[in-house]
Amino acid sequence: MVVIILVSFFYKRNKRREKFTLLLFRSISGNGGIDRLSSLNNEDLLSYLSVILLKNNVNINRISTTSHEDDIFLPYLYLEDKDVIANPLDIRTGTILKIPLLSEEILNMNNPQSIRRIRFLTDSILNNVTESF
């Protein structure tokens, strides 16, 4: 029974990872121009949905919308990659991003506590970023 649950868990995560990679290539590259990013080797499958190398500038909203189907999750992407992102609204070419694999609890848009936490994080990140410019 435990084996079936574990296999189901990893199968679901793997399918989510495949769907994200496909969507990311379509969304960011536009018009099929896959030359705008590269998918890199993801050595931590339990923590990251994907690891990507940007070949063109992009904003974190677009990545969040593609990876987690809503731009509300952008604080989790920023917090994971804040050491390489100077401006989340203009992430530069050559940047390597680790796209975090978020828990079902965080992804639950029906959880008011989760939504409040996300909004608080977003506000504090945007305030800090705008103050630095």
Image (spheres, rainbow, N blue to C red):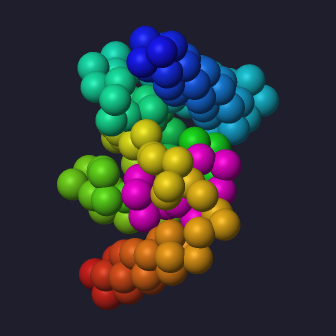
Position of 77 relative to 127 (above/below)? above
| Total numbered labels | 0
Q: Residue furthest right?
A: 31
Does any portion of residue 72 appear in the rendered image? yes
x 64%, y 63%: residue: 109
Residue 35 location (% of width, % of height): 57, 22
Does any portion of residue 71 appear in the rendered image? no
What is the chief secondary structure element of the magenta stretch? helix
x 54%, y 19%: residue: 8
Q: Quadrant of the C terminus?
A: bottom left
Residue 34 location (% of width, % of height): 62, 22
Magenta span of residues = 68-77
x 34%, y 29%: residue: 46
Residue 52 location (% of width, % of height): 42, 30
Q: Is residue 32 magenta?
A: no
Q: Is residue 33 left or right of residue 132?
A: right
Q: Is residue 70 magenta?
A: yes
Q: Is residue 42 left or right of residue 1?
A: left
Depth check, front residue: 3 or 35: 3
Position of 122 relative to 38 (above/below)? below
Q: Dividing the picture into quarters, in which one does residue 122 lie?
A: bottom left
Residue 47 location (% of width, % of height): 33, 35
Q: Is residue 33 left or right of residue 2?
A: right
Q: Residue furthest front?
A: 1
x 32%, y 87%: residue: 131
Depth check, front residue: 69 or 103: 103
